[in-house]
Image: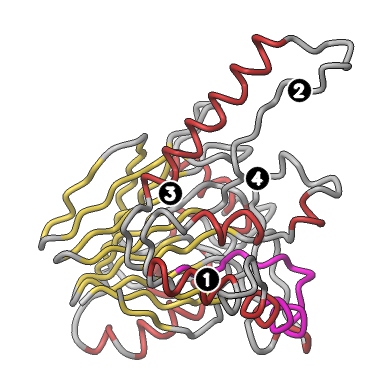
């Protein structure tokens, strides 16, 4: 069985408080289980709760052994690392995977910097767990026991990888933090710097890159996709911030035969009330009066279920 449990669903910064009780305020952390194999995606603040759970449950059966895949090294995806309790147990075995850095730092050096004495009382060298660090580009890895992972570069302000986990004919894909590829060149023929050839090339390249992302999650059982913004928010000064919006993502699964689309990486200012409203809005949103709503149309055409991520939620592929 291949499943995913959500321990952190927020983006950018933790958002605890009375307005985020239902969906949760911790930043990105996923627990993926391929039968007995444990995979963790991202080390946001949700990993503290996961670590406590592992020590109270899995540790009774034997040492914690896990592969940790970091999507990228922005702080909200690493900030929970020092509070992951299995780090302080000598029998713990961790393989931490992440994208290469464009500036030359290793994944280990970046985590070490987070544990600098200016920021935290415990050094990386003082952790008891056995840790191995691996940096990747686009590739396919055989993790053993029939579990494979494919990686894909996403569109973000730093190198960021999407992951496709495949196990016994089932699959889970992560596509966050990710912004749709857009034409970066002027398309207004009246603009002073408009160039027809450049504009057409920009359109072609953006289309090709978006098609590559769609191919990456085609036919997947569970797609966990960045949806930090609404379209209005995105067009209000958030271009280039590296995140997607509902109106773009949800229709994009139509031709990809995605079975379950999980809306993820909620904006820290998005309250429970906001998310409930958005969920209801998308359930009744109508492209065609005869369809009974956009989501209903998607469900009929491609058997796609659309789910807004919530802490504690478990989904089976």
**Residue furthest out toward the front:** 290
Q: Is residue 95 above or below residue 211?
A: below
Q: Nearer the viewer, residue 299 or 131?
A: 299
Pinpoint residue 312: horizontal percent, then vertical percent.
Answer: 49, 85
Residue 157 to residue 278: above or below = above
Q: Which residue is mark 1?
A: 83
Q: Which residue does the numbered mark 2 point to in the structure image?
A: 187
Label 3 close to label 4 by CB (< 8 Å): no
Describe residue 154's horizontal placement relative to residue 67 as left or right.
right
Magenta stretch containing residue 42, yes or no?
no
Which badge, 3 or 1, is on the more N-terminal residue?
1
Instruction: Assign a secondary structure to mark 2.
Output: loop
**Residue mark closest to the camera, 3 vs 2:** 2
Distance between mark 3 and mark 4 Cα atoms: 13 Å
Give the distance between the C-alpha atoms of the residues marked 3 and 1, in whole angstroms. Answer: 25 Å
In the rendered structure, find residue 162 and report the number of the disc placed on it: 3
How much space separates mark 1 and mark 2, taking CA atoms?
Answer: 48 Å
Q: Are marks 4 and 1 in contact (CB under 8 Å)?
A: no
């Amino acid at each position: 069985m291949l499943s995913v449990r959500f321990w952190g669903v927020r983006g950018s910064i933790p958002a605890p408080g009375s307005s985020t009780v239902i969906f949760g305020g911790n930043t990105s952390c996923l627990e993926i289980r391929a039968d007995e194999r444990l995979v963790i995606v991202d080390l946001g603040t949700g990993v503290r709760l996961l670590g406590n759970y592992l020590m109270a449950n899995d540790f009774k059966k034997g040492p914690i052994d896990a592969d940790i895949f970091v999507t990228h090294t922005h702080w909200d995806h690493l900030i929970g690392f020092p509070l992951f309790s299995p780090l302080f147990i000598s029998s713990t075995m961790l393989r931490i995977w992440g994208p290469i850095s464009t500036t030359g730092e290793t994944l280990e050096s970046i985590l070490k910097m987070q544990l600098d004495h200016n920021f935290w009382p415990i050094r990386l060298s003082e952790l008891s767990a056995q840790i191995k660090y691996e940096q990747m580009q686009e590739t396919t890895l055989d993790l053993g026991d029939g579990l494979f992972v494919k990686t894909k570069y996403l569109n973000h302000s730093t190198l960021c990888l999407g992951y496709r986990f495949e196990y016994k004919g089932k699959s889970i894909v992560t596509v966050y933090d990710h912004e749709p590829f857009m034409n970066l060149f002027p398309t207004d023929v009246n603009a002073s710097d408009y160039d027809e050839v450049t504009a057409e090339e920009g359109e072609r390249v953006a289309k090709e890159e978006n098609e590559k992302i769609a191919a990456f999650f085609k036919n997947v059982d569970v797609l966990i996709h960045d949806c930090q913004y609404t379209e209005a928010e995105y067009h209000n000064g958030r271009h280039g911030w590296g995140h997607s919006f509902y109106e773009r993502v949800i229709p994009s699964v139509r031709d990809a035969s995605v079975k379950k689309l999980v809306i993820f990486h909620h904006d820290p200012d998005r309250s429970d009330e906001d998310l409930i409203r958005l969920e209801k809005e998308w359930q009744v949103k109508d492209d065609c009066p005869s369809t009974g709503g956009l989501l209903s149309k998607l469900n009929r055409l491609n058997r796609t279920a659309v789910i807004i991520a919530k802490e504690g939620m478990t989904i089976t592929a």
